[in-house]
Image: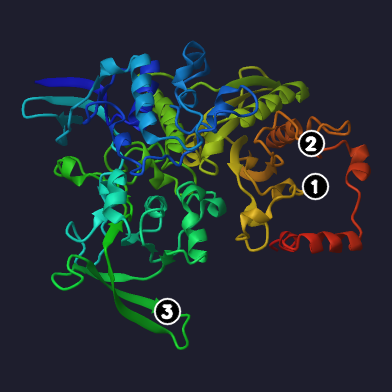
């Protein structure tokens, strides 16, 4: 039996359901295939210790839907404010107010959304895809010996494919447990009073080490290089505070350790008093010794748990004669265009955590990030393949003889937009929104359009020929201080109000292009709550138009106009009153109380 669908989605997790809902809302035909007996099947087992490390903040200032979604990292991005008004349970925050909720609740949420939003009629569960091939430009998806489905496009939302096993002699099923096979419910019985090595340096390794704190005689996290901390890198994929308590415990010498040893061999001991235990051989470089030496030693442990990450490629599923998607050098990810299409196989898209290949620094490997990617991809697919023209999210006419009123309205929209945007905020530096200024049919009138958020590379491909434009991007500014590697907990005082480029925390930056060349970048001062439609201060001297004026100046600059408006947080006449200069003695006293401020004063040349 042969069927045809223009779009086939493989995988019924949050990525596949996000894509399905985006297509469904546009009345675009699709079929979703899920191998498990229900959607969201992987959330029964992952994370293996049962607790999510993704944010679930129910209570935030204000009621704006997309602003609230910034802090609700689980709800599908295509759930609109109108959907929620009809059924509040379409938001995950209505299921639990726990900041770090249980994973199994998320599966129930995904099932609920699929049912309530009418997706189940397009979903086939218990359907395992055996093979994908291509013939005469169409993909063929083999489901069983007798059932095949053809499609113009396939969206792989299958998540991780296989664990990465390090190159260590003797490592295998008889000598180690893989992350995905770790049984948290049986951990107390299996690992009680044992010496356990956890191999890895990411959240999965420290998730397990955190779980074992109450159980083992010693837990030893072995890494070739030290972890990076999310609080320092601002990268959600790096080590999160919830599971990094092992560092505190290591400092206390509490038999929870972190070492940078290199394991080169492991084997199971047979016979003797250590029968059944593991012998580990190490070869560890010690360049800090005098003179530098190699440390070659052996040790005995009880168990080895491997948490070295996952691949997201599935060579076994493709007919390599007709479908050969290119991968990176390690074979971990498929290489994708700016619209997440295989660089070598048109029509083959990879969505979900595999989108991280294009975005190593923001959030594309987590649900809250890739849901924004998929929302943008829905716009691309609808326009490219289903004759649905992309529409600006705001537009106005700017009469060049008297542009002030129109630019003020445009600036007001930009401020409201950056104050509530989910995609720009979650995918800082990676996503941007283009603001274009195009000639209209009317003489001396320019049509200004604000476009939805897309990857910056895609924006350049699409709007790069627009001579006068703005790109709105969220950025961090910690690199503006010292050598760019200062601990982020140094930054507890306000950024420089007189130089907004010194804003350390995430904030909007408007990159201005005129004549096709970037001529300026204007920063909106960082905000305590990520809102620029509200002011952090309530003084009578406050310049409530501060952020609107930043946007106005960017628009004026893009059009080559001379008018600029004050972007100081207070009105000009109150600068002396609100910002009195410090004396040398006052500076010295402030540095005595908080010495780390000296580092913030040493800016890069």
Label of residue 404 in the image:
none
Q: Which residue is mark 1?
A: 498
Vertical placement of residue 581 versus 527, above or below: below
Which quadrant of the figure contains the N terminus? Answer: top left
- Distance from Cα at disc 1 to Cα at disc 2: 21 Å
Instruction: Report the residue at 32% width, 54% height from top.
Output: 307
Across and down, in percent, residue 460 comes to 50, 39
Observer able to see residue 157:
no
**Residue 586 visible in the picture:** yes
Q: Looking at the image, do the residues carrying marks 2 and 3 touch, with CB atoms under 8 Å apart?
A: no
Dot 2 crowding, Cα within 10 Å, few <14, some 14–19, many 20+: few
Mark 3 against mark 1, which lies toward the viewer? 3
Q: Residue at x 41, y 35 (%)?
A: 102
Disc on the earlier residue, 1 or 2: 1
Q: Residue furthest bottom?
A: 291
Sooner in the amino-acid sequence: mark 3 or mark 1: 3
Return the residue at label 3: 286
Q: Is residue 572 above or below residue 17?
A: below
């Amino acid at each position: 039996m042969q069927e045809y669908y223009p779009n086939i989605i493989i995988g019924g997790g949050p990525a596949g359901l996000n894509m399905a809902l985006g297509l469904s809302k546009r009345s675009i035909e699709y079929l979703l295939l899920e191998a498990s007996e229900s959607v969201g099947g992987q959330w029964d087992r992952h994370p293996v210790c049962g607790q999510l490390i993704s944010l679930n903040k129910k209570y935030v200032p204000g009621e704006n839907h997309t602003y609230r979604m910034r802090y609700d990292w689980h709800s599908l991005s295509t759930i609109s404010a109108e959907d929620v008004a009809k059924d509040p349970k379409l938001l995950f925050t209505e299921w639990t107010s726990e900041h770090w909720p249980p994973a199994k609740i998320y599966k129930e949420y995904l099932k609920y959304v699929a049912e309530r939003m009418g997706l189940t009629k397009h979903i086939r569960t218990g359907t395992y895809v055996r093979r994908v091939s291509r013939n005469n430009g169409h993909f063929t998806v083999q489901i069983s010996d007798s059932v095949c489905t053809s499609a113009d496009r396939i969206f792989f939302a299958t998540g991780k494919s296989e664990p990465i096993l390090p190159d260590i002699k003797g490592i295998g099923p008889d000598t180690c447990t893989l992350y995905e096979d770790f049984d948290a419910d049986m951990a107390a019985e299996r690992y009680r009073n044992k010496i356990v090595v956890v191999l890895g340096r990411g959240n999965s390794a420290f998730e397990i080490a955190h779980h074992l704190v109450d159980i083992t005689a010693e837990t030893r996290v072995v890494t070739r290089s030290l972890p990076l901390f999310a609080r320092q890198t601002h990268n959600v994929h790096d080590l999160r505070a919830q599971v990094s308590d092992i560092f505190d415990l290591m400092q206390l010498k509490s038999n929870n350790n972190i070492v940078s040893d290199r394991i080169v061999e492991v084997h199971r001991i047979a016979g003797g008093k250590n029968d059944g235990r593991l012998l580990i051989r190490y070869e560890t470089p010690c360049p800090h010794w005098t003179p530098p030496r190699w440390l070659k030693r052996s040790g005995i442990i009880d168990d080895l748990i491997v948490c070295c990450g996952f691949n997201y490629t599935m060579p076994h599923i493709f007919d390599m004669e007709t479908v050969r998607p290119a991968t990176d050098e390690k074979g971990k990810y498929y290489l994708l265009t700016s619209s997440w299409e295989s660089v070598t196989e048109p029509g083959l898209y990879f969505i979900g955590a595999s989108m991280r290949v294009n975005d190593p620094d923001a959030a594309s490997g987590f649900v809250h990030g890739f849901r924004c990617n998929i929302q943008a991809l829905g716009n691309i697919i609808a326009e490219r393949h289903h004759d649905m023209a992309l529409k600006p999210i705001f537009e106005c006419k700017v009469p060049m003889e008297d542009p002030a009123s129109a630019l003020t309205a445009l600036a007001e929209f930009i401020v409201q937009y950056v104050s509530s945007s989910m995609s720009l905020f979650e995918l800082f530096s990676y996503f941007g929104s283009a603001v274009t200024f195009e000639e209209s049919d009317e003489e001396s009138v320019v049509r200004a359009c604000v476009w939805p958020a897309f990857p910056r590379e895609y924006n350049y491909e699409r709007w790069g020929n627009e001579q006068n434009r703005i790109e709105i991007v969220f950025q961090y500014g910690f690199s503006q201080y010292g050598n760019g590697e200062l601990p982020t907990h140094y930054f507890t005082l306000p950024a420089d109000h007189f130089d907004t480029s010194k804003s350390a925390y995430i904030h909007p930056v408007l990159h201005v292009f005129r004549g096709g060349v970037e001529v300026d970048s204007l920063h909106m001062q960082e905000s305590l709550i990520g809102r620029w439609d509200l002011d952090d201060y309530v003084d009578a001297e406050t310049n409530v138009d501060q952020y609107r004026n930043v946007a106005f100046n960017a628009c004026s600059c893009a059009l080559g106009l001379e008018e600029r408006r004050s972007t100081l947080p207070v009105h000009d006449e109150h600068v002396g009153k609100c910002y009195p200069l410090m004396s040398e003695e006052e500076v010295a006293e402030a540095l005595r109380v908080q010495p780390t401020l000296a580092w913030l004063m040493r800016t890069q040349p």
